[in-house]
Image (tube, rainbow, N blue to C red):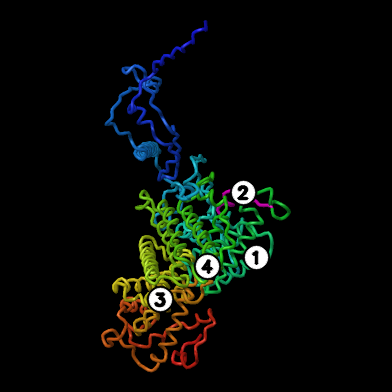
Amino acid sequence: MSDPVAVPTPTPTPTPSRIRRNTACTSCRDAKVSNMSWVALGDGLAYNFHLPWQVRCNPSSQPSQPCQRCSRLELECVVDRSHKRVSRRNKIDELVQEIQTIKQTVGSAHPTGDITAARLSKELPLPQPVIPSPDATRASVSDRAAASGPRTTETPTTTLAEDVPIEPSRPRALGSQPFTGEDIDYYFKMYFEHFHPYMPILTQRDPNKCYESGQVLFWTVILVACRRYAKNPQVLPFLLDAMKRELFSVLSSLPISIHTINAMVLICTWAFPDVRFVNDPTCMFTGVIMNASLLLGLQAGKGSNPAFSFGGFQGSFTDEEAHYTWAGYNVVAQRSSHYMGLPPLGNLFNQTVQNVIDGKTPFHVPSSFRVLLECQKYAHRASKTMAACLEESEGVSSYIVQQLEDDFDNIRGLICSERAATTDNMDKFNALLVQLEIQTYYLIPLPGYNPEALKRNILRAYTTAQAVLRDALSLDDQGGFLKHMPHFAFRSLLSAMCIIYKVFRSSYKQSLDKQGAERSAANCMAVCRRSVVQEGDLGARLAVLFDSFWSVAQSTNIWHGEPTVSVGTQRFGAGVCFDCLKLWKNDIDTMRPKTAATAQVPNAEGDANSSDMLAPASALATSSATLGVGTAAASGADPLAHIDWSFMDDFDWNFEPSLLAPVGLGP
């Protein structure tokens, strides 16, 4: 008899140790917040708060008992489906308000008393920008930083060495020109108050220590301050001649110290006022800065780097000085290569610059400078892309330009965030300049383009150029931006003016709003006039030049075709400026015989065939009163009779003698 088959006994289902429910308790739901990394405050400090990434609510097997987490933490466990947890932003705002309240309470407890002159000089606050500055520790706008996880850094310290009392300046002399101690203190105060925020690379504000560390840097600071605040009208011309000799003499000996490098960075930022359009020495200086910085190892962001300290190359600078100098070089190199129409070969924007952008430094970096670096880093990327395109073809695809615009919009959204929209106009302006720089390439299209798409894109660039001029004048009204702006900012404004003029003289003119065009013409003249540093500088010459632009536009009804760049495409974005001046010369070639034969240019009321887009008479009259320049709209005389024709030496342009004979002006 066979054995019976054993039937397996079914395993009993275990009783669950906890019940299941779809809704977590209110305590666990409130704890489900993402990790908050850095919370930036407006007082220049940043605080790090670490919260758990995820919290699970494990109910107890007994419905009347609290969940495991509430039981362990002794919290009240309530299940409420209508409960809404507090958002992350609200928590951040509450924490910020609590910390600000604590700081105000602690700060108000310090007694205030009489402050002596020595203590006052010691406790002078950081120089504030002439335009509203951003939060000192706003989160990085870098796309790399946005993708990175939470990080911790040391509490930022001040950029300037203000912990040591500043002694009264000793009198100095440069050649035959003496400077008293009071004059030196005054010029240093003006520099750090009005110019330093635009290029904050100097960490030492004591004039005596600055002179001991490097005389070239010392006199460069005074030269920059004298651009607007010279006590004697003869000081600025003297400093220009003396500093050119001093600066070129130190370039012949190696190694070049970091203080001399800083002086060259400042000269590149505020170029010599008598610089011409195409003989700007900034590009040559940036090449010297790059090689001198690499020999000192500044690209590593380390002071006294043992890998580069050999023989005479013994660096005595700090990590902070290395970071600031290298970052400043990257800015001026990118800007000078762009407005001169050269490929961006010398700009590195390496990890040292990225650390400054992200705030990964043990010292404080002004947030406005970090935003400027972020903008120029992206402009460098765009320039390299356009250079590659123009090497292989005669234009740039609008799809590539649109892609660069879309990518920058993501960064721009972080730069111009809602929190900083009411407090940071300079950051928005720097971002707007990069947007215009990208849109400039719409004027260099590939052959076979769509005319309607081209017109739409160029009119967008025209609108951006108008916004650039409006914002520049607004910043100037707030704090004198046009009086203190860097030279590369003025060259960006020149690009906006050239785009506006090219559209004025194109077939797109009929699509423009007449009043808006007149305001743009007035804004161009106003920007040039307010930017004048000394008689005959680039701003003054451009004011006269644009005066004739509008006069030509007023006195002729001849329109060009589409406002694309016909010459100078190998000059990249700067080709717009060169093409605009070439267009102006062609207009003069066409207009000059007519104006020489007639005593008066027809105005809008006397000639029905004249242009419908006239230059504003008030703007031209103001230009005439300010610069002593007669205009067709103001005096009815020859609109070309007061042009400074010497600027043509920059381009090796020669008109026929019959065209220049009635002018009666010297070179």
Q: Is residue 365 above or below residue 631?
A: above
Residue 126: x, y in percent?
46, 51
Residue 447: x, y in percent?
47, 72
Mark 2 sits on what residue? 302
In the displayed structure image, the side of residue 74 where residue 365 appears, left or right = right
In the image, farthest residue toward the front: 1
Q: Badges 2 and 1: C-beta atoms under 8 Å apart?
A: no
Q: Which mark is residue 271?
A: 4
Q: Say if residue 235 shows up in the picture.
A: no
Q: Mark 1, mark 3: which one is toward the viewer?
A: 3
In the displayed structure image, the side of residue 637 where residue 411 appears, left or right = right
Q: Quadrant of residue 409?
A: bottom left
Q: Badges 4 and 1: C-beta atoms under 8 Å apart?
A: no
Label 3 or label 2, whichever comes before in sequence order: 2
Q: Mark 3, mark 2: which one is toward the viewer?
A: 3
Label 4 or label 3, whichever comes before in sequence order: 4
Mark 3 sits on what residue? 562
